[in-house]
Amino acid sequence: MIITNAQNRRYLTGFTGSAGTVIVTKTRALLLVDFRYTQQATNQCDTFEVLEIDRNHLYETIQEILEQELIQTVGFEQHHVTYFSYQLMKSKLTAILKPMPTIVEDLRMIKTPEEIEIIKKAAWISDEAFNHILTFIKPGISELDIAYELESHMRKNGATGAAFDMIIASGHRSALPHGVASSKIVEQGDMLTMDFGAYYRGYRSDMTRTIAVGEPLEQLKEVYQIVYGALQHALSNMKAGITGQEADSYSRDYITKKGYGQNYGHGAGHGIGLDIHENIFMSTICKDMLEENMVLTVEPGIYIPNVGGVRIEDDVIVTKEGVEVITHSPKELIIL
């Protein structure tokens, strides 16, 4: 199999450089890099054979390896290979090209103890940033000001940067599930949703807290308690051995019974790790099973157009008995 996706390459080899190709055969595991990365790859890859190549002749080198190994069929990552790259492989390689599904991504679903410790540290960095931002937020600052301050604080605590493009949405914009930080000014009475995470040693955390800046509308206070209850209900019932569909239903059914089912339009959570969105994706159609040592988000939300919205999100580790919550910031409604 030929593996080119950066996160899959890192997961398999430990190599953190920005360019390289993995070739796995029955007898060999190779990482092909050009001269820029030879030393780095050699230092980082204990179990892979590092081969320095001319990057202008990548596929000629792969062809030589396939011939040496007598390989007639080679897989490629169907979700990551562009049409241009596929055409190039097809013209350069004599082996049959076989599109492969998410083989490496499926391996990544179950985290090792080392991965879990790194993600826990990323979650801790997020918690520290949330505690700090409560002292920073006030009417008159912009959503972008909040995003910059969160990232700065996370970097000071060891993060490489933000885990993704933060969602900072205040007032009527809090009704946007993916309301990326804008120049909007935070006003008295706004609900303020902050969905952010830390990027730490290649792994990511993903936490959402919604607070109020001044006294919010009574409807939004009611909505907050419903979302909070839905999250608690999900956290109390999730465990290894259930489907993603069942996990999704715990928060969805709770919110639906309270009359806001039509305002909860996204899935209940997803895997996190090297990528911010990994398998599994809990939803009304997810048949995949939750397994021990998966690390997932749980993130119910209610969004009322032109009024506001609430989302509360924790990161959890799946166990046989339930889930271990690793984001510890307070979830009760905070009114600044």
Image (cartoon, helix red, strand yellow):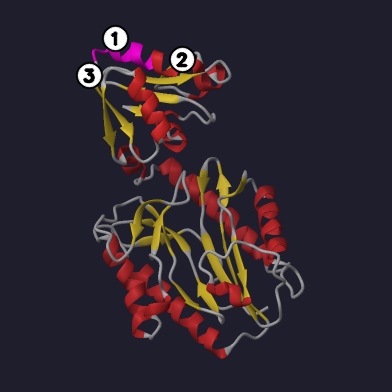
Q: Let me know if residue 66 is in the magenta part.
A: yes
67 w.r.t. 318: above or below: above
- Residue 212 appears left or right of 45: right
- Compare marks 2 and 1 and give the one earlier in the sequence: 2
The residue at which mark 1 appears reads as 68
Taking the view exactly as shown, the residue that stands out farthest to the bottom is 218
Give the number of the mark in front: 3 or 1: 3
Magenta segment, which residues?
A: 61-70
Local SS, label 2: helix
How far apart, in angstroms, are the residues tagged by discs 2 and 1?
17 Å
How far apart, in angstroms, are the residues tagged by discs 3 and 2?
20 Å
The residue at which mark 2 appears reads as 57
Residue at the spot 72% in from the left edge and 71% down from the top edge: 185
Which dot marks residue 72?
A: 3
Q: Position of residue 30 (x, y in %)?
A: 39, 19
* Whether label 3 touches label 1, CB < 8 Å: no
